[in-house]
Image: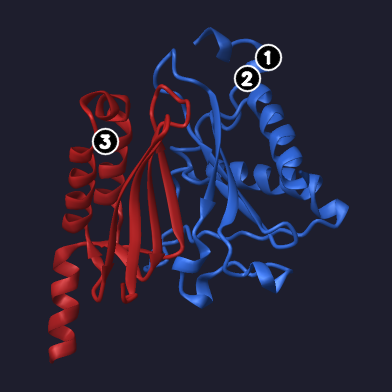
Amino acid sequence: MADRLTPSHRVLFPTFLEDHEVYQQAVAYWQMLFEALFSTKDIPFQRYYNTVSPDGEKDYTGNPIFDGYFPRQHKLVRIIQFIATETDQPRFDFWEDAWPTAELDPALRPIPHDPAKSLEPVPELVISLELSTDTAEQARALVEAWVRG
Amino acid sequence: MHRKKHRGRIQAQGGGLEASETWNQDGPLTKQEGRGLLARLKSKLTPEEREQRRKSFEDAERFIDGARGGLDAPQRRSFLSTQGKGLRIDIEIWGGTAFIALIILILVAIWLID
């Protein structure tokens, strides 16, 4: 727990799982981070995954807290945010996967700028983190490099 | 295989493992069916692979139980091991609705019959 006390590892939005207002602030944080990285550089992205239940109830689990589909690159980024429950639990993890577009109904498929890719699996970068000033910087660098790469 | 309205997959991934259970059916997947798929997936893993993902399975089951009114596609949730390293359980909803309570399904069926 000591790392929560040092300024460089300060956990951001520590009550986001308990307070819906704080949760929305955390979502806005990711939205602004993505916009700063991409929208200002004319790299469009949009939310893709459904996180609302059929009765309109919003999801407040942080899984995912944010995602973006980049139609020009035909890539997805998914951010999972958590609060660590064990002291030795890794605070930052990531992996690459693919979203099987061809398995989806046409209306649910992401729409790439290049129509030839419309049935191709979408490469996806997934980051799972306890958000802190430290891990936010790791995520920012990773997302930027991956989308541009 | 003929593609039906309600489809998806539950996967155990990371550390070189890729095991999965899929569904492809006319009606929404119930919570009970979802838990059954999760149990079948668990039974495919070695004791070590299961232990590595113990919390992932618990979190995935809690997620299925907690889904209110079901969940509509497209959705993808990952339940990471406390060990990190990408060891996880993924739930993917490709089409239709999943994790609806059985009672809701029965009420909808009665309403449709009436």
Separation of marks 3 and 2 at Cα, in angstroms: 28 Å
| Left or right side of A104 for A38 | right
Task: Work out how far the residue at label 3 is from the one at label 1, CA to CA, in angstroms.
Answer: 33 Å
Label 2: element kind: loop
Q: Are tags 3 and 1 found on a single chain?
A: no
Identify residue for label 2. Answer: A10
Question: Splitting the image into 4 quarters, where does residue A11 fall?
Answer: top right
Packing grade of label 1 (10 A; few <14, some 14-19, many >=20) is: few
Residue behind mark 1: A7
Image location (x, y in percent) of residue A34 = 73, 47
Image-based side of A107 in relation to B108, left or right:
right
Q: Quadrant of residue A135?
A: top right
Q: The residue marked by circle 2 belongs to what chain?
A: A
Q: Have a look at marks 1 and 2 and say if they share a chain.
A: yes
Q: Colour of chain B?
A: red
Task: Using the image, tell me which numbered label, if any, was put on residue B86.
Answer: none
Secondary structure beneath disc 1?
A: helix
- In the rendering, at what x and y percent does residue A149 appear? 76, 43
Query: Label 1 is placed on what type of residue?
Result: Pro
